[in-house]
Amino acid sequence: MSDCLFCKIAAGEIPSSKVYEDEKCLAFHDIDPQAPTHFLVIPKEHIGSVAEVNEDNAATVAHIFTVIAREAKRLGLQSYRVVSNIGEQAGQSVPHLHFHVLAGRDMTWPPG
Ligand code: 5GP
Ligand code: ZN
């Protein structure tokens, strides 16, 4: 999508601090970190949110989870939280699927 912030980051049109990249996805540090470790993992193809996951793009989403597990291991994260907000009420501010990976501090439950 031409006016999507994360499509532009995925295409390299807007710079990001990369954690990992391959042909299907990109992981990069959040610009406003909410924990000592806070990066986002996004598909390079535009998917609006978890609400748009379907049989056609599910393999990409599964791949993202393998990347999260591998990068967390590589970074030595013992405990971490993976979050995806869907829709404005849940706090989604960028309408391109992304998984937050947060670690390095105590976390509360339920989330606010
Ligand atoms: P959401 O609020 O949709 O769950 O998460 C969007 C996240 O993207 C926020 O944590 C926000 O800080 C991050 N973000 C927004 N704009 C940029 C940007 O231009 N670069 C980076 N690296 N992160 C961004
Ligand atoms: Zn997009």
Image: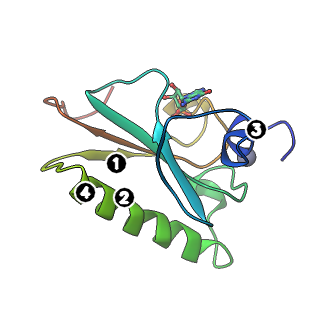
Real-space Cα separation, disc 2 to disc 4, in angstroms: 10 Å
Mark 4 surroundings: few (<14), some (14-19) or many (≥20) residues within 10 A? few
Which circle's residue, 2 or 1, is located before the other in the chain? 2
Q: Which mark is residue 74?
A: 4
The residue that appears at 13% across and 30% down in the rendered structure is: 106
Q: Position of residue 82 (x, y in %)?
A: 34, 48
Residue 39 position by quadrant: top left
Label 4–label 1 contact, CB within 8 A = no
Q: Nearer the viewer, mark 3 or mark 2?
A: 3
Q: Which residue is mark 2?
A: 68
Mark 3 surroundings: few (<14), some (14-19) or many (≥20) residues within 10 A? few
The residue under label 4 is which amino acid type? Arg
* Residue 33 left/right relative to 97: left
The residue that appears at 22% across and 58% down in the rendered structure is: 73
Q: Is residue 46 above or below residue 104?
A: below
Which circle's residue, 1 or 3, is located before the other in the chain? 3
SS category of the residue bearing label 2: helix
Q: Which mark is residue 13?
A: 3
Q: Which residue is mark 1?
A: 82
Which circle's residue, 2 or 4, is located before the other in the chain? 2
Which circle's residue, 3 or 4, is located before the other in the chain? 3
SS category of the residue bearing label 3: loop
SS category of the residue bearing label 1: strand
